[in-house]
Image (cartoon, helix red, strand yellow):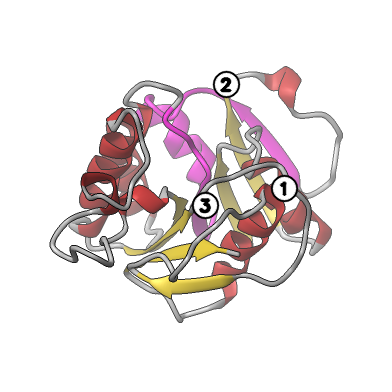
Amino acid sequence: MNICLLGATGRVGSIILENALKENHSVQALVRDLTKITGSERNLKVLHGSVLNAEDLSDAMANTDVVISALNTGGNQTLSQSMPFIIKSMKDQGIKRIITLGTAGILQARSEPALYRFQSSESRRTSTRDAEDHLLAYLLLKDSGLIWTVVCPTYLPVGERIGTYRFEKNMLPDNPSSISIFDTADFTYCQLFSNEFLNCRVGLTY
């Protein structure tokens, strides 16, 4: 499989990259800082650029089959600002499938299903800025006509690879705790080979 990976230098994205290369998939990674990716794997092509630049995205997606985005908000509106460019580049390149990393805040609240978790009493957030950016990106994706999956982990410590966790469509499982970056990356990567969560969000926790 030929994969376009966005956010390949991040905590979760770097593990997704390892998984893909370990299983001999070809990866084209668009990165802002070339010094953050080391190694010269035969199946890895690293492109320097920005997800806010349409031409850079087009180059990164050329001749790929699927997009995985492990981008984070970075304390700004990177997600929502880049999503229109991502969607357009995918359509221009004829790519239909995208898997993105979200946040549990944009799942429906179990106690108040009409609200997103970050809007409800279930959330412990002191600021909703990042969740609002994730929400805008999700809503753009939802209306894009693409085949998408948004993986929405709860609290993300580094942790370790445990290999067992709970997940649920569009909501966070009862009594959530945390989920390591390793298990989050593994679950996200596995969505490449699953049709279980097409066009929905997935809540993920131990």
Residue type, numbered disc 2: Arg
Density class for disc 1 (Cα within 10 Å; few <14, some 14-19, many ≥20) is many
Disc number lying in front (2 or 1): 1
Q: Residue at x 58, y 45 (%)?
A: 156
Outermost residue to the bottom? 196
**Mark 2 or mark 1: whose residue is earlier in sequence:** 1
Outermost residue to the left? 114
State the image coordinates of residue 164 (x, y, percent, origin top left). 69, 72
User: Magenta stretch: residue 46 in it?
Assistant: yes
Q: Residue at x 17, y 56 (%)?
A: 115
The dot on residue 32 is 2
Q: Residue at x 18, y 57 (%)?
A: 143
Q: Residue at x 74, y 18 (%)?
A: 35
Residue type, numbered disc 3: Ile
Region of the chain picked out in magenta, as a range: 44-73
Q: Could you tell me which quadrant the C terminus lies in?
A: bottom right
Q: Are marks 1 and 3 in contact (CB under 8 Å)?
A: no
- Residue highlighted by disc 1: 15
How far, Cα to Cα, is label 1 from label 3?
Answer: 12 Å
Q: Nearer the viewer, residue 199 or 126?
A: 126
- Residue highlighted by disc 3: 68
Residue 79, quarter of the rendered image: top left
Indicate the secondary structure of the residue bearing disc 2: loop
How far, Cα to Cα, is label 3 from label 2?
Answer: 16 Å
State the image coordinates of residue 3 (x, y, percent, origin top left). 59, 54
**Mark 3 or mark 2: whose residue is earlier in sequence:** 2
